[in-house]
Amino acid sequence: ASLGFASQDIKSPVSIFGHTFLVFHNDETPEAASLTVEFTGEATDLSANISALFTSVPGKYSLNYLSGKIRQYDYENRSIWLYRLNLDKNELQKLKQYLLHSENTKFAYDFSQKNCAFYIAKAISQTNDTLAFKQAGLFVTPVSTLAWIRSEKIISSEKYLPSTQLKALQAFEMLAEPDQRIAIRHLSPLANLPSPVTTKQEIGNALSAMIE
């Protein structure tokens, strides 16, 4: 099993700190059909999102496939990091049993403390009696969850999955300046802009459109 971390999405309040989830896989590199488990709040509209800022809304663990999560985050131009958890068979079974028993249970969810990071950390802490996630500060964030599992030394390997847009932009930046100017002239129509693309965001969007 691995802890997945998706980079932040500044366009979405619920994802401004990023997102954590679990991936269950057999191979060292997770298969596209690997199951993922995440915790989300039932905040489907603006009023519910606002409520979750100041109080709590119902939330639950949910299943997906890794291929779906990759497509979702790639569309949002968010890169993914996967951290393989060093769990033995007994610990892995405890994690699965906890999630299975919690599958249809609703828990209190809010943005600042009892969020995706908190509940994923809670699930991981079920694997061993010596593991205990402790909140530090006013907010529980995906980064704090990652810092916790690093401190517990239960990461055996890491894998980075950059977004398509980021890979395209990195390839663009490796071009010589004259070639970049030529590329920019051809990218503007793909970005649906009336004038030449100029910002990294515009260039990245156009490059992604070309790849797709």
Image: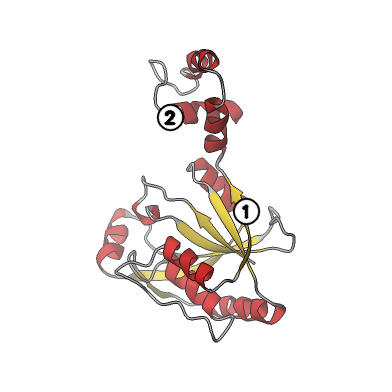
Circles 1 and 2: CB atoms closer than 8 Å: no
Residue at the far bottom: name it.
129
Residue type at tag 2: Lys
Q: Is residue 139 visible?
A: yes
Residue name at image x 53 percent, y 35 percent: 165
State the image coordinates of residue 202 (x, y, percent, origin top left): 43, 27
Q: Which residue is mark 1?
A: 159
Residue type at tag 1: Lys
Q: What distance separates the C-alpha of mark 1 from that of mark 2?
A: 25 Å
Q: Quadrant of residue 107?
A: bottom left
Q: Nearer the viewer, residue 20 or 158?
A: 158
Q: Quadrant of residue 97?
A: bottom right
Earlier-in-chain disc, 1 versus 2: 1
Residue name at image x 41 percent, y 48 percent: 9
State the image coordinates of residue 147 (x, y, percent, origin top left): 47, 66
The answer to whether residue 65 is left or right of residue 10 is right
State the image coordinates of residue 104 (x, y, percent, origin top left): 52, 75
Q: Which residue is mark 2?
A: 200
Q: How many marks?
A: 2
Q: Quadrant of the N terminus?
A: bottom right
Q: Which secondary structure, mark 2?
A: helix
Residue name at image x 55 percent, y 42 percent: 163
The answer to whether residue 112 is left or right of residue 178 is left
Q: Nearer the viewer, residue 158 or 75?
A: 158
Residue at the far left: name it.
54
